[in-house]
Image (cartoon, grey):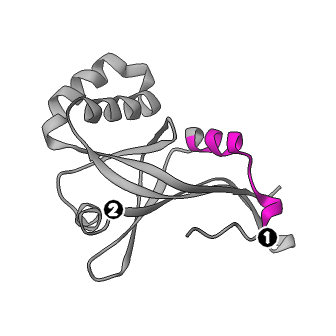
Amino acid sequence: MFREMRRKEKTMSKESVAALLNLAEEGVLATTGQDNYPYAVPLNYAYHAGAIYFHCAETGQKLDNIENNNNVSFCVIKDTKIIPDDFSTKFKSVVLFGKAQELFDNKKEQGLILLLEKYSSDYLEAGKKYIKNAMDKTRVFKIEIEHMTGKETI
């Protein structure tokens, strides 16, 4: 169902893919709307136990799209460097596919704590209070990864 990467010599190891997903600060989520147009939106995320977690507001286009079709793609890119005299670019990237599912109750809170640990680790106690106050104004999703590839140019 998923294509193999064409340039196999640029394949990243599974360990390097996990490291990149843990280090990158933002990614791009791609969804499909009822109009069959793709919609890609940058967002913060956390990678944990082989899944991607993200939070969002209560309404919006990505949520409408996920409700219509929860098959999504997610991409991160890091360490980009344009090489003008070589007409090339150096980079590391990960592209993954999976199903987005909304989290509730304790799992929702756990997803928010993963994001807190990644982006505000010096403010855990204040962040946990913030989470308690924002729980009913925030939605949290988990992408169960079905296929993932990493690519790097050296």
**Residue 98's spot in the image, x, y percent?**
45, 57
Work out which residue is located at the far top of the displayed protein and give it: 125
First in sequence, mark 1 or 2: give its number.
2
Is 65 left, or right, of 146 in this rendering?
left
Q: Amino acid at mark 1?
A: Ser
Is 59 left, or right, of 44 in this rendering?
left
Task: Identify whether 129 is placed above or below 154.
Answer: above
Specify the segment rendered in magenta. 7-21
**Residue 21's spot in the image, x, y percent?**
57, 44
**Residue 139's spot in the image, x, y percent?**
23, 46
The secondary structure type at the circle numbered 1 is strand
Q: Find the distance from the CA under tag 1 to the CA under tag 2.
A: 35 Å
Q: Residue at x 86, y 71 (%)?
A: 86
Query: Residue 133 versus residue 16: which sits nearer the camera?
Result: 16
**Residue 121's spot in the image, x, y percent?**
44, 24
Residue occupied by mark 2: 70
Which quarter shows the N terminus?
A: bottom right
Work out which residue is located at the far right of the displayed protein and give it: 86
Residue 88, disc: 1
Tag nearer the camera, 1 or 2: 2
Which quarter shows the C terminus?
A: bottom right
Task: Identify whether 139 is placed above or below 92.
Answer: above
Circle 1 packing at 10 Å, graded few (<14), some (14-19), many (20+), is: few
Circle 2 packing at 10 Å, graded few (<14), some (14-19), many (20+), is: some
Residue 129, disc: none
CB under 8 Å between discs 1 and 2: no
Q: Is residue 9 magenta?
A: yes
The secondary structure type at the circle numbered 2 is loop
Q: Amino acid at mark 2?
A: Asn
Is 58 left, or right, of 19 in this rendering?
left
